[in-house]
Image: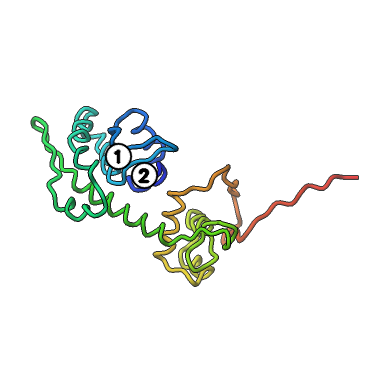
């Protein structure tokens, strides 16, 4: 089962969309869990992606029919069965309508495998940076790397700052951070910096009282 934030990454939708398919019961109850948090079966991200990507071409009734028709197969899904399912027929037929869900399943499995790789890349230990998620074998915080990429800093410059990393590790770090966002209010972004400059680090100083 994936956390809602992880499911959003795999399905390539917003967290709001994942919450919507749960709240509005678009996904069958067999594919989700709301005990101690919100979780979605990994393969069910196929149906989340399908539901939103096909919204302009199919009616809500048609999309829900496809989801209900596919649910029995997905609820029995496990990692060992993935190879066989990739070779299976994912065609859903309804009256004059024919829907092929295989492309959605393929993309979801590919993203799920990348998320697995991102998770394996990360180490969380109280003995390393006080439990901050870091890239395994380093003391490089994952969310710092992701923030640098989100800020538009060129990959070449980031790799110069972190020579132990590779471009693939940068992408996986960004994926992990997206699936596991930090809690709390995000740091404010400086609206305008002089051209060619970038923030290396920042910290706050307590205001001194006069007198």
**Quadrant of image for the N terminus:** top left
Q: Quadrant of residue 171?
A: bottom left
Image vertical order of residue 58 relative to residue 85, above or below: above
Left or right: 126 with respect to 206? left
- What is the CA distance from the residue labelled 2 to the residue labelled 1? 9 Å
Image vertical order of residue 118 relative to residue 156, above or below: above
Q: Earlier in the sequence, mark 2 or mark 1?
A: 2
Q: Position of residue 133 (x, y in %)?
A: 51, 57
Question: Circle 2: is it few (<14), some (14-19), or many (20+) Cα within 10 Å?
Answer: many
Q: Look at the numbered disc 2 and give the secondary structure of its residue.
A: helix
Residue beneath the point at 82% across and 48% down? 208
State the residue in front, 51 or 82: 82
Q: Position of residue 77 (x, y in %)?
A: 24, 46
Image vertical order of residue 139 relative to residue 41, above or below: below
Which label is found at residue 48? 1
Residue beneath the point at 23% across and 31% down? 64
Marks 2 and 1 in Cβ contact (< 8 Å): yes
State the residue in front, 166 or 141: 141
Q: Which residue is mark 2?
A: 7
Q: Look at the numbered disc 1 and give the secondary structure of its residue.
A: helix
Q: Quadrant of residue 71?
A: top left
Residue beneath the point at 42% across and 44% down? 5
Left or right: 5 with respect to 90? right
Q: Position of residue 7 (x, y in %)?
A: 36, 44
């Amino acid at each position: 089962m994936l956390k809602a934030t992880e499911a959003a990454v795999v399905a390539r939708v917003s967290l709001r969309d994942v919450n919507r398919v749960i709240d509005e019961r678009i996904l069958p109850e067999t594919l989700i869990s709301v005990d101690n948090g919100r979780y979605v079966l990994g393969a069910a991200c196929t149906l989340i992606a399908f539901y939103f990507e096909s919204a302009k071409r199919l009616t809500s009734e048609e999309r829900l029919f496809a989801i209900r028709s596919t649910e029995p197969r997905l609820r029995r899904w496990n990692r060992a069965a993935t190879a066989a399912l990739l070779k299976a027929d994912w065609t859903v037929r309804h009256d004059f309508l024919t829907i092929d869900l295989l492309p959605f399943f393929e993309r979801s499995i590919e993203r799920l495998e990348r998320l697995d790789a991102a998770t394996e890349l990360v180490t969380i230990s109280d003995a390393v940076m006080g439990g901050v998620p870091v890239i395994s074998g380093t003391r490089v915080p994952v969310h710092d790397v992701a923030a640098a990429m989100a800020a538009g800093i060129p990959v070449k410059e980031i790799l110069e700052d972190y020579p132990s990393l590779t471009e693939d590790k940068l992408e996986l770090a960004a994926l992990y951070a997206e699936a596991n966002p930090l809690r709390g209010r995000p740091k404010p972004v400086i609206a305008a910096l002089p051209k060619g400059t970038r923030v290396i680090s920042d910290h706050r100083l307590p205001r001194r009282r006069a007198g």
